[in-house]
Amino acid sequence: MTHISVNSWVKRFESEGVKGLETRPGRGRKPIMDRSDEEAVCKAIENDIQSMKKAKEAWRQASGKDASESTFRAFLSALARDIDV
């Protein structure tokens, strides 16, 4: 931590109380893949269930987005967990 960060927190606490210390929306890096990609990913997987690389390429062409193989796998895992629950 830098003293600048701590001073910023103190000022936020003094002006807004504990509520001012909560993480505000819009902070941090935005995810490459989100809920809007679910349909396109599911469709890509249905069309080529045997090859994740081909499904990833189909999703990339459909969405215009690009993600690493590990990001794509993590997104698929999250979808599978959502389905199981």
Image (cartoon, rainbow, N blue to C red):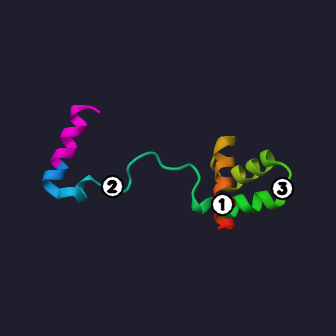
Three-letter amino acid code at the position of disc 2: Arg
Which of 22/45 is in front? 22
Residue numbers of the magenta segment: 1-11
**Residue placed under numbered mark 2 in the picture:** 24
Is the Cβ of the residue at disc 3 closer than 8 Å to that at disc 1? no
The kind of secondary structure the magenta stretch mainly shows is helix
With respect to residue 38, does 59 lie above or below? above
- Residue positioned 83% across, 56% down in the render: 49
Residue 71 on the magenta span: no
Q: CA distance from mark 2 to mark 1?
A: 27 Å
Q: Position of residue 24 (x, y in %)?
A: 33, 55
* Quarter of the figure with the C terminus: bottom right
The mark nearer the N terminus, 2 or 3, is 2
* Quadrant hosting residue 35: bottom right
Helix, strand or loop at mark 1: helix
- Residue positioned 18% across, 39% down in the render: 7
**Residue placed under numbered mark 3 in the picture:** 49
Q: Which mark is residue 81?
A: 1
Three-letter amino acid code at the position of disc 3: Ile
Q: CA distance from mark 3 to mark 1?
A: 18 Å
Residue 7 on the magenta span: yes
Circle 3 packing at 10 Å, graded few (<14), some (14-19), many (20+), is few
Q: Position of residue 70 (x, y in %)?
A: 66, 42
Q: CA distance from mark 2 to mark 3?
A: 39 Å
Q: Position of residue 73 (x, y in %)?
A: 69, 48
The mark nearer the N terminus, 3 or 1, is 3
Q: Position of residue 9 (x, y in %)?
A: 22, 45
Q: With 17 as the anchor, is 53 left or right in this view?
A: right
The mark nearer the N terminus, 2 or 1, is 2
